[in-house]
Amino acid sequence: MTKPLPKRASVIIIGGGIQGLSVAFNLIEKGERDILVLDAGYWQGGASGRNGTLIRPGFASLAWTELFVLTVNEWKTWSKRLGENVMFTQRGYSVVSEQEKSEAMLLEGLKVQKRLGVNSRMLTRREIDDMLPAINKSRVRAVQHQPDGGVAPHHAVMKALFSFCERNGADIRYRTRITGVERTGERVSGVWVGDELVQAGCIVSCAGPNNPDIAAMASVGINGFGMRIEAMALEPTRPLIKPAIALIDSLAYFHQTSRGEVVGGTEVPERPRMSLQVDFPVMANMAKVYLEMFPQLGEVRILRHWAGQLHASSDYAPLLGEHPAVRDLWFSAGWSYGFAGAPAAGKLIAEGIIKGHIDHRMKPFALDRFEKTGPIVEGGIVLA
Ligand SMILES: Cc1cc2nc3c(=O)[nH]c(=O)nc-3n(C[C@H](O)[C@H](O)[C@H](O)COP(=O)(O)OP(=O)(O)OC[C@H]3O[C@@H](n4cnc5c(N)ncnc54)[C@H](O)[C@@H]3O)c2cc1C
């Protein structure tokens, strides 16, 4: 028999993907135990179980790089703090440019990264030969290499987060959809699950593509739109690609897993078709880009191909913090790099809720930046 929902929780988190569970984990570490996580779907059913798992500290803008330096530092501590190996492997992350404009962006980004102490550099031709022997060098203009970047398999990460939160008293329910948000004057005071009201001291929306729906339930708006992206895994092959790779001009990203599968995707400018169905033309585009850059991949077949859904903001940067128009409703939303970014977001949002402290690394990502400071300009992301 399903356990009845509690009547109240100090913090209700909407969405049990990596963002929601990271917020719960960080709140628990700060002493909050009365946490209810409600998720409409199944464990790992959202984008957190469908992504490329690539993680890197360096981008082109100060705002993104500061946030992602923090996130990589947090990733390094997660296995110990969670008491389970999240298998974060710092095998390096190479951003490959094929055009003059993107090379200039990588060089500018390198200056920002150096200022923040990121251990990145442009590779020499000889280093490209050594590190990326299988790459089609005739297409490569420049490579920015970030040795501290890498990958972490989502099943290990999600399992460690889920177990830690459950062991420490968080009540996590999948297959439980929020259908309404209760407002009391200027603040939110609970959520509706069908005809049941659960009162809350504070609500954190980590509902992926449904973040705008949650905002609407509280009678407020949030920037952004739903977006579908696709990825695929190839048959295992001998080690061909050591670091994680982003092809900034071909809008592609991938890495080779320890089992030998090449996993990743390419971005195509098609939105907002929200479904989990895959498209043959998208798969064909991925295959084309992979083959142009790594011709030896022509010898392996496609093993799996899938889609996932995101909430993207109009500058593709995350939306972090309390909603400016209603108190006690927080968001970790707008995520396109939300697997990599979850450790930083969880930490900063938990600090905001518990201590009322808004860290300088979270401020640029405020929900009202479009009206106040303007969009964040970031040229180093792989998004159409
Ligand atoms: C193909 C693909 C490749 C990607 N590659 C990378 C990558 O390499 N690196 C990277 O950093 N990021 C990557 N991403 C992005 C990353 O996966 C997401 O940004 C991240 O998983 C977002 O986490 P989340 O917890 O916000 O969302 P999700 O994991 O989608 O979780 C949201 C949850 O909210 C629940 N929910 C929605 N509505 C409701 C409701 N009304 N009531 C209750 N629950 C609700 C859903 O059931 C879902 O479980 C990729 C994404 C895709 C799809």
Image (tube, rainbow, N blue to C red):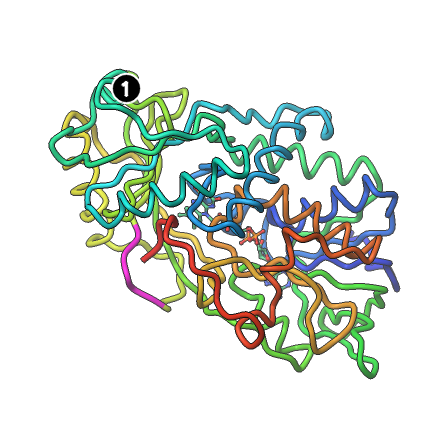
On the image, the x and y values in percent for residue 220 come to: 64, 80
Seen in the picture, residue 30 relative to 227 is either above or below; the reply is: above
Specify the quadrant of the image occupied by residue 257: top left
Identify residue type, mark 1. Answer: Glu
Seen in the picture, residue 86 relative to 41 is either above or below; the reply is: above
Query: How many discs appear?
Result: 1
For residue 269: magenta?
Answer: yes
Seen in the picture, residue 71 relative to 273 is either above or below; the reply is: above
**Badge 1: how crowded within 10 Å, few (<14), some, or many (20+)?**
few
On the image, the x and y values in percent for residue 274 come to: 40, 65
On the image, the x and y values in percent for residue 324 come to: 69, 74
Q: Residue at x 53, y 36 (%)?
A: 154
Magenta stretch, main secondary structure class:
loop
377 or 82, which lies in front?
377
Name the image quarter holding the C terminus: bottom left
For residue 97: magenta?
Answer: no
Cβ of mark 1 under 8 A from ligand 1 = no
Is disc 1 placed on a helix, strand or loop? helix
Q: Residue at x 40, y 39 (%)?
A: 110
Magenta part of the protein: which range? 267-271
Q: Which residue is mark 1?
A: 127
146 or 304, which lies in front?
146
Q: Is residue 361 left or right of residue 166?
A: left
On the image, the x and y values in percent for residue 46 come to: 52, 51
Q: Is residue 169 left or right of residue 50?
A: right
Specify the quadrant of the image occupied by residue 14: bottom right
Q: Residue at x 70, y 49 (%)?
A: 348
Q: Residue at x 68, y 61 (%)?
A: 321
